[in-house]
Image (cartoon, grey):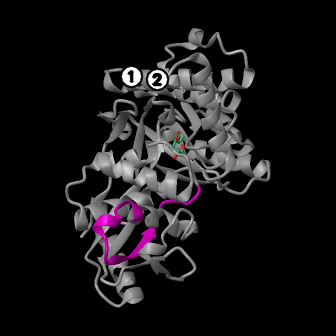
């Protein structure tokens, strides 16, 4: 992760080099890790993410020729350039589709087009919301430059539509909400149906705890089938139960009418996961020891592994090794089928636990994982 001043400088300099002029500003938006509440967002349920210190930066300047030019410091160096009237779902494709989708959503405000350079230290494809960091940094930039009346909640929708309608990834609003609405030192408790938020203080260091992220290095993408399949299965389960969304099922007993084993498993994950979010929030809000959330995180993993069936051998190995080595709890995070896990561990055991995970990966001939400690960080902001 890079500090904000250095990050803004680097983006400005790279913008000037690519486009031969100063940007009008530089904006940053973070990736996220979800403490608990996985796949609940498109079921009208609850989530509890924190923003990472890792961000994507967008250096932006408006143009007058009706074109957009998109460059990334992480790409192959090529500038993707096209006319605003050529934008269409899937065009441009690849990483450029994400910012282009945001531009498309604000077309009426942006007749002259824009030049954009992005730089990121959010691990890509690691289940840490690199795509939301990208769309949200651009959305905030365009709000400040051309659409000052938009609220942060409008930007959540704008960024989500870019992913859903333009890129074709059928995600919910967890990632975009985390990137735009999180605040430093807090987890964001979000009711995705009511769009109600609460900043829940989360200072794990003060009680001698660390939340480790383990990036397994196995990639995932949400435009692929597995994520969309789960979403459809949840919608089918809700339809069979005659409720608007699985959020409306109060407990597992309410699933008795589901006679399809796959739909029952999917729905059971959502119903129990919503309860886990509420329980974790209750613990964190109160005077209880945050270590008590450990077993709940582990239950969440087992539910994602056995009922939602989106874990991988690497993620399971990580969770098992971490808990065997003394972590309070651990779970896979994000959309699944690869990506990262989080591990809740006492600070003095963190190095031992990380080493145990690395050893287990080595023993099983998996590529070495990358680990880092999560400091709940600020949401999207202008850097300069
Ligand atoms: C991805 C999606 C989110 C959410 C999570 C799973 O990150 O983008 O909307 O569904 O998976 O919790």
Q: Position of residue 107 (x, y in %)?
A: 35, 66
Q: Is mark 2 within 8 Å of ligand 1?
A: no
**Residue at 41% in and 76% down:** 117
The residue nearer to you, when weighing 343 against 308, is: 308
Cβ atoms under marks 1 and 2 closer than 8 Å: yes
What is the distance, in whole Å, between disc 1 and disc 2 at their CAs?
Answer: 7 Å
Name the foreground residue: 347 vs 174: 174
Front residue of 77/32: it is: 77
> Residue 246: where, in percent of width, then height?
53, 24
The residue pinned by badge 1 equals: 283
Residue 264 appears at what percent x and percent y? Answer: 67, 20
Task: Look at the picture and state if 30 lies above or below 107.
Answer: above
Task: Identify the residue at image location x=53%, y=43%.
Answer: 350
Residue drawn at x 36%, y 38% is 187
Q: Magenta segment, which residues?
A: 104-125
The residue at the far bottom in this view is 20
The quarter in which the C terminus is drawn is: bottom left
Quadrant of the rendering where the N terminus is positioned = bottom left
Residue at image mark 2: 292
Look at discs 1 and 2 and give the one toward the viewer.
1
Tell me if mark 1 has few (under 14), some (14-19) or many (20+) residues whose alpha carbon lies within 10 angstroms of its own: some
């Amino acid at each position: 992760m890079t500090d904000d001043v250095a990050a803004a400088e680097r983006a400005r300099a790279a913008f000037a080099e690519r486009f031969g002029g100063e940007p009008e500003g530089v904006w940053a938006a973070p990736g996220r890790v979800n403490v608990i509440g996985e796949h609940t967002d498109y079921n009208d349920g609850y989530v509890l993410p924190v923003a990472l210190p890792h961000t994507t930066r967008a250096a932006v300047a408006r143009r007058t020729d009706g074109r957009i030019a998109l460059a990334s410091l992480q790409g192959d160096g090529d500038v993707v350039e096209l006319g605003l009237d050529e934008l269409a779902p899937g065009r441009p494709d690849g990483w450029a589709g994400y910012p282009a989708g945001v531009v498309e959503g604000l077309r009426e405000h942006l007749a002259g087009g824009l030049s954009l350079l992005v730089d990121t230290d959010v691990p890509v494809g690691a289940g840490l919301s690199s795509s939301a960091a990208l769309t949200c940094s651009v959305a905030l930039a365009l709000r400040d430059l051309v659409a000052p009346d938009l609220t942060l909640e409008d930007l959540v929708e704008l960024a989500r539509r870019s992913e859903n309608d333009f890129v074709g990834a059928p995600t919910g609003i967890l990632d975009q909400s985390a990137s735009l609405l999180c605040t430093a030192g807090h987890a964001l408790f979000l009711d995705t149906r009511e769009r109600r938020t609460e900043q829940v203080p989360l200072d794990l260091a003060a009680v001698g705890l660390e939340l480790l992220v383990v990036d397994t290095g196995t990639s995932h993408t949400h435009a692929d089938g597995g994520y969309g399949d789960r979403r459809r299965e949840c919608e089918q389960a809700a339809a069979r139960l005659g409720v608007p969304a699985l959020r409306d099922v109060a407990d597992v007993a309410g699933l008795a009418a589901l006679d399809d084993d796959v739909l029952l498993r999917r729905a059971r994950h959502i119903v129990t996961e919503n309860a886990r979010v509420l329980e974790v929030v209750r613990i964190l809000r109160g005077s209880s020891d945050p270590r008590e959330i450990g077993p709940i995180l582990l239950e969440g993993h087992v539910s994602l592994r056995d009922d939602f069936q989106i874990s991988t051998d690497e993620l399971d190995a990580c969770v098992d090794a971490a808990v065997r080595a003394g972590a309070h709890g651990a779970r896979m995070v994000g959309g699944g089928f690869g990506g990262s896990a989080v591990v809740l561990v006492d600070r003095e055991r963190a190095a031992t636990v990380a080493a145990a995970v690395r050893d287990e990966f080595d023993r099983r001939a998996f590529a070495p994982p990358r680990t880092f400690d999560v400091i709940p960080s600020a949401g999207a902001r202008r850097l300069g």
